[in-house]
């Protein structure tokens, strides 16, 4: 494992958690959006992550241990996908987006966003971001101590 591997791994986690926080904020902001450009109510989004195991685009002939081919390269964002859960139905015949005909007449399709779930996810993303930031700071402190030892 190379000198900067821990920082690279933690920074990939920080990037992923920041995107998760942005997606959660978008979900909360649209918790009452009943009409979207695609039609229908807003659908909750979620970030899909996977372990980063791909080979680097370069290999250093002088530092071969910096980029070993094993697992433990951090996390990568695969994409952001919409939740397929059904929208909630709320009876409100005065709402402009209420269903006009059929057995669901007077009901409004509301977004499938649960504020409590989103807040729990936001706390988890925030704590994961903080944990990765602690790893970066610890690595930095360790590097500085090593340089200090080497300068004596």
Image (cartoon, rainbow, N blue to C red):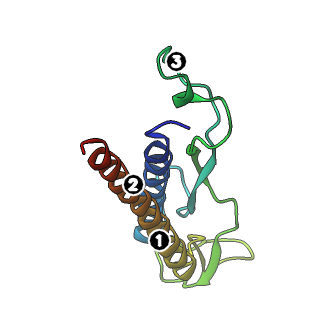
Report the side of 7 relative to 108 (left or right).
left
Which residue was labeled with disc 2?
Answer: 136
Q: Marks 2/3: CA distance?
A: 23 Å
Q: Residue at (55%, 24%) from the top-left corner? A: 56
Q: Residue at (58%, 58%) from the top-left corner? A: 46
Task: Kindly check if marks 2 and 1 are in contact, taking CB atoms under 8 A apart as contact.
Answer: no
Q: What is the quadrant of the C terminus in the image?
A: top left
Q: Which of marks 1 and 2 precedes in the sequence?
A: 1
Q: Residue at (52%, 62%) from the top-left corner? A: 42
Which residue was labeled with disc 1?
Answer: 127
Report the side of 44 relative to 131 (left or right).
right
The residue lying toward the viewer, choosing from 1 and 107, is: 1
Q: Marks 2/1: CA distance?
A: 14 Å
- Per the image, label 1 sits on a secondary structure element best described as helix
Can you give x and y, in whole percent of width and height, for residue 13 in the image?
49, 52
Q: What is the quadrant of the N terminus in the image?
A: top right
Q: Residues within 10 Å of mark 3 (few under 14, many from 20)?
A: few
Q: How crowded is mark 1: few (under 14 residues within 10 Å), some or many (20 or more)?
A: few
Q: Residues within 10 Å of mark 2 (few under 14, many from 20)?
A: many
Which residue was labeled with disc 3?
Answer: 59
The residue lying toward the viewer, choosing from 109 and 101, is: 109
Single out the residue that lies furthest toward the front. 152
């Amino acid at each position: 494992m190379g000198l900067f591997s821990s920082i690279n791994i933690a920074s990939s986690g920080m990037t992923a958690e920041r995107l998760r926080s942005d997606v959660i904020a978008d979900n909360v902001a649209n918790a009452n959006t009943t009409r979207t450009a695609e039609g229908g109510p807003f659908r909750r989004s979620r970030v899909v992550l996977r372990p980063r195991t791909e080979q680097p685009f370069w290999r250093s002939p002088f530092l071969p241990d910096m980029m070993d081919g094993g697992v433990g390269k951090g996390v990568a964002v695969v994409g952001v996908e919409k939740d397929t859960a059904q929208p909630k139905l709320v009876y409100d015949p005065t709402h402009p987006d209420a269903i006009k005909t059929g057995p669901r007449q007077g009901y409004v399709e509301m977004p499938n966003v649960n504020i409590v779930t989103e807040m729990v996810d936001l706390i988890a993303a925030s704590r994961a971001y903080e944990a990765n930031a602690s790893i970066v700071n610890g690595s930095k402190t360790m590097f500085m101590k090593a340089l200090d030892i080497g300068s004596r």
